[in-house]
């Protein structure tokens, strides 16, 4: 990006992306120091997303999120409450699944509902999976 030829709006937008990216990397580093199991789950979620392609990674309000592929994200609908999402998720799993299986079920849950936004923060997904595995 050339600073001399770019408009101020473009420079500001690029700066915001850099700041948000740096903050996100710092958050994941802190997760790995504070809660290594959650950090490992988040890493495995990202690997599964890149491998299986049933979700797309989206940045929303500076936060890393995921959304099911090939369906409307319902962005105008209200977001899931963390506990509400956990209730849906816990009904569908038994705690012995691997991350790819859990993400497939999670994708199905999001696709079947039409009342809430289908874009979910990655950390929220990781916390739900963590509670499923360790409870």
Image: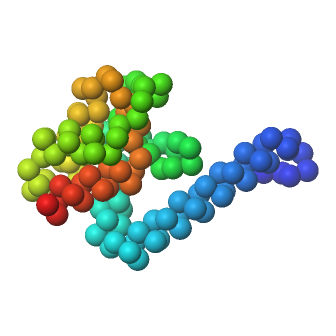
Establish if 72 lies above or below 45. above
Report the label total.
0
**Residue 129 at x, y = what percent?**
24, 54
Q: Residue at x 59, y 57 (%)?
A: 21
Residue visible at 35% across and 51% down? 124
- The quarter of the picture where the C terminus appears is bottom left
Q: Nearer the viewer, residue 8 or 48?
A: 8
Picture coordinates of residue 126, whole percent (x, y): 32, 55
69, 62: nearer the viewer: 62
Q: Nearer the viewer, residue 81 or 96?
A: 81
Q: Position of residue 41 (x, y in %)?
A: 30, 62
10 above or below 33?
above
Colour theme: rainbow
Q: Which residue: 23% across, 34% down?
A: 109
Q: Residue at image x 66%, y 58%?
A: 19
Residue 70 seen in this snapshot: no
In the image, residue 7 sits, relative to residue 116, either above or below, namely below
């Amino acid at each position: 990006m050339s600073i001399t030829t770019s408009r101020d709006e473009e420079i500001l937008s690029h700066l915001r992306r850099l700041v948000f990216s740096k903050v996100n990397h710092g958050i994941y580093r802190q997760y790995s120091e504070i809660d290594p199991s959650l950090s490992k789950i988040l890493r495995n979620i990202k690997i599964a997303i890149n491998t299986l392609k049933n979700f797309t990674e989206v940045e929303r309000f500076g936060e890393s999120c995921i959304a099911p592929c090939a369906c409307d994200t319902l962005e105008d609908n209200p977001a899931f409450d963390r506990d509400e999402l956990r209730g849906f998720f816990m009904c569908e799993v038994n705690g012995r699944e691997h991350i790819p299986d859990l993400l497939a079920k999670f994708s199905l849950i999001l696709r079947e509902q039409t009342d809430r936004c289908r874009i979910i923060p990655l950390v929220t997904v990781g916390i739900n999976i963590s509670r499923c595995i360790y409870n």
